[in-house]
Amino acid sequence: MNDASSQLEAIRASAIAEAEQCKNSMLVVTRLLDAYRGFAPAEREEADRVLAEWTLADEESRRYDALAVIRELRVTAAVPALRERDRRLDSESDPGAPFEQKKVRAVLDELEA
């Protein structure tokens, strides 16, 4: 795990704990956005890879955080992973899958426009 990857993981973990205490669900995304914006170009490339990986994670909240950051920052490097997530959602039976797929497709549309 390199520096940007380690930082994103640590920031997310810290923000989750703080968000639970202050009951601010958007704190995690805000902290991730701030961290990303502070990265040097090479760190941003690694952060892009991490965010793309998170879109394929089993953990729903991790996917949500990644999707929000990708959308806000227009992380086009995540397009292949988002396409893969869209394909996976086609075969998921989870009741939330259609809603997540709608979000994923909306982000793909924005990034590919």
Image (cartoon, rainbow, N blue to C red):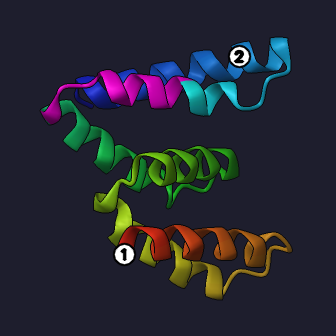
The disc labelled 1 sits on which kind of residue? Glu
Say which residue appears at 71% left-offset and 13% top-offset. Answer: 18
Q: Residue furthest left?
A: 42
Say which residue appears at 83% left-offset and 12% top-offset. Answer: 22
Q: Which residue is mark 1?
A: 112
Q: Which residue is mark 2?
A: 17
- Closer to the N terminus: mark 1 or mark 2? 2
Residue 102 versus residue 17 in the image, above or below: below
Q: How many neighbours does mark 2 have within 10 angstroms: few (below 14), some (14-19), or many (20 or more)? A: few
On screen, residue 79 versus residue 24, left or right, reads left
In magenta, the rendered stretch is: 31-41
Mark linked to residue 52: none
Say which residue appears at 59% left-offset and 52% top-offset. Answer: 63
Looking at the rendered image, the disc whose residue lies closer to the viewer, 1 or 2, is: 1
Q: Is residue 28 magenta?
A: no
Q: Quadrant of residue 65?
A: top right
Instruction: Indicate the quadrant containing the N terminus: top left, top right, bottom left or bottom right.
Output: top left
Say which residue appears at 68% left-offset and 23% top-offset. Answer: 16
